[in-house]
């Protein structure tokens, strides 16, 4: 990992510019002993004036979420009842997960927060009936955040820190670039001194070029970079296996004969597929064979997606079939086996493999430095 910065790495959390409440939470609630590598390098830049803008890349499960959550909690003025920190995520699942970390890490701070994600049928409120947002930290998806800004219920005038989680997808042409630019422009209209943090496990050349040209134009100030060499991106702890399968039936036979046998020994499993149809077809085939599996994809109702994730995180289900809705950012410590039923391809060039998504998928089996198994 390399960084173009004069800042000194932190050896202990107590070396950092953190409040006593945050230090207590890191110790008691999070049970963190010392900063990870990415935390040690990036947190001094995030937390100390003049609050450097940062583009940071690190492995899945290396502690990136802690970096920006500590940054958001540290910048909030508790006396100011207005949005001051904004974290934008590509999926509702990742937004909910990040909010859970924020609530746990900020337990002793009495900071208010709100989730900006599509509402399910049980808590839907028409946007014209929603009150003005006064929560100090907002975490959400770009579509909902933009709707709130357009409806003038989410103000940007007090915004101090903007975070893009899974920034490569948030700023790519095939991802949420248009939404992200609109949000950035809304902030700049009120405050061009807002600190910007871009975090992801991968950054391709096109996104790096976009950041250099567009993001740095919008937001003033220094930009520091922390990058991992391409050859170092693959997690060493993840054992990767390749199985040649001539057709779909053969893949199912491998899952039945080999994968589930391994899965029973190592913990929970995620099987990644390319499309919603593939997810449904594989689910039906495995259930027909007598296996208990759950399936998640973008076409499901919001409340159903939430229930599936909750049950998987609680360990009530062991095998989860998923499209790439869970490829990025989703962390579940008990997942030690990831199966690529379909290899990922680029959205705009379906004949080309998507190496970045592949690395994100692989990372699900090697988060937090634990040993993982990966198969396709």
Image (cartoon, rainbow, N blue to C red):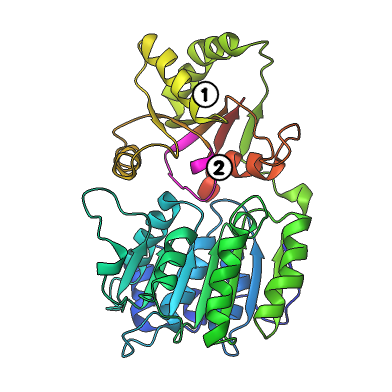
Task: Tell me if I can see residue 344 in this picture.
Answer: yes
The residue indicated by pointer 2 is 366
Quadrant for the C terminus, please. Answer: top right
The residue indicated by pointer 1 is 278
**In terms of depth relative to the viewer, which is nearer, 299 or 96?**
299
130 shown above or below 253: below
165 shown above or below 360: below
In terms of secondary structure, where does tag 2 sit?
loop
Residues shaded magenta: 324-336
In terms of secondary structure, where does tag 1 sit?
helix
Q: Earlier in the sequence, mark 1 or mark 2?
A: 1
What distance separates the C-alpha of mark 1 from that of mark 2? 25 Å
284 shown above or below 97: above
Task: Tell me if I can see residue 194 in this picture.
Answer: no
Q: Where residue 230 appears, x then y in whole percent?
A: 77, 51
Quadrant for the N terminus, please. Answer: bottom right
Q: Where residue 129 appears, x then y in whole percent?
A: 25, 68
The circle drawn on residue 13 is none
Residue ID at (44%, 76%): 85
- Is 47 covered by the magenta stretch? no
- Report crowding for label 2: few under 14, some 14 to 19, many 20 or more residues within 10 A (C-alpha): many
Residue ID at (31%, 85%): 81
Assess whether mark 2 and mark 1 are in contact (beta carbons under 8 angstroms).
Answer: no
Q: Where residue 160 appears, x then y in whole percent?
A: 49, 83
- Report crowding for label 1: few under 14, some 14 to 19, many 20 or more residues within 10 A (C-alpha): some
């Amino acid at each position: 990992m390399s960084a173009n910065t004069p800042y000194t790495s932190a050896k202990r959390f107590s070396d950092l510019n953190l409040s006593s409440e945050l230090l207590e939470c890191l110790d008691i609630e999070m049970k963190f002993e010392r900063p990870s590598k990415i935390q040690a390098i990036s947190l001094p830049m995030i937390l100390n004036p003049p609050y450097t803008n940062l583009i940071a890349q690190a492995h899945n499960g290396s502690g990136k979420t802690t970096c920006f959550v500590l940054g958001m909690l540290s910048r909030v003025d508790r006396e100011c009842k207005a949005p001051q920190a904004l974290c934008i995520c590509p999926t509702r699942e990742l937004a909910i997960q990040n909010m859970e970390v924020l609530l746990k890490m900020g337990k002793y701070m009495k900071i208010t927060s709100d989730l900006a994600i599509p509402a399910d049928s049980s808590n839907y409120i028409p946007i014209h009936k929603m009150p003005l947002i006064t929560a100090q930290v907002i975490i959400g998806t770009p579509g909902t955040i933009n709707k709130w800004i357009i409806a003038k219920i989410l103000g940007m005038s007090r915004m101090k820190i903007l975070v893009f989680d899974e920034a490569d997808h948030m700023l790519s042409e095939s991802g949420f670039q248009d939404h992200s630019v609109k949000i950035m422009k809304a902030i700049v209209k009120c405050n061009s001194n807002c600190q910007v943090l871009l975090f992801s496990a991968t950054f391709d050349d096109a996104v790096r070029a976009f950041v250099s040209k567009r993001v740095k134009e919008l937001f003033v100030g220094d930009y520091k970079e922390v990058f991992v060499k391409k050859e170092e991106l693959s997690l060493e702890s993840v054992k990767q296996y390749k199985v040649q399968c001539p057709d779909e039936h053969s893949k199912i036979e491998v899952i039945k004969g080999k994968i589930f046998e391994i899965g029973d020994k190592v913990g929970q499993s995620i099987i990644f597929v390319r499309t919603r149809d593939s997810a449904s077809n594989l689910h039906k085939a495995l259930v027909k064979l007598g296996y208990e599996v759950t399936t998640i994809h973008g076409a499901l109702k919001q409340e159903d997606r939430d229930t599936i994730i909750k049950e998987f995180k609680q360990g009530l289900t062991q095998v989860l079939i998923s499209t790439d809705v869970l490829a990025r950012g989703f962390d579940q410590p008990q997942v030690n086996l990831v199966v690529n039923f379909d290899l990922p391809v680029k959205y705009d060039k379906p004949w080309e493999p998507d190496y970045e998504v592949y690395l994100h998928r692989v990372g699900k089996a090697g988060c937090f430095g634990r040993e993982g198994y990966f198969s396709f």
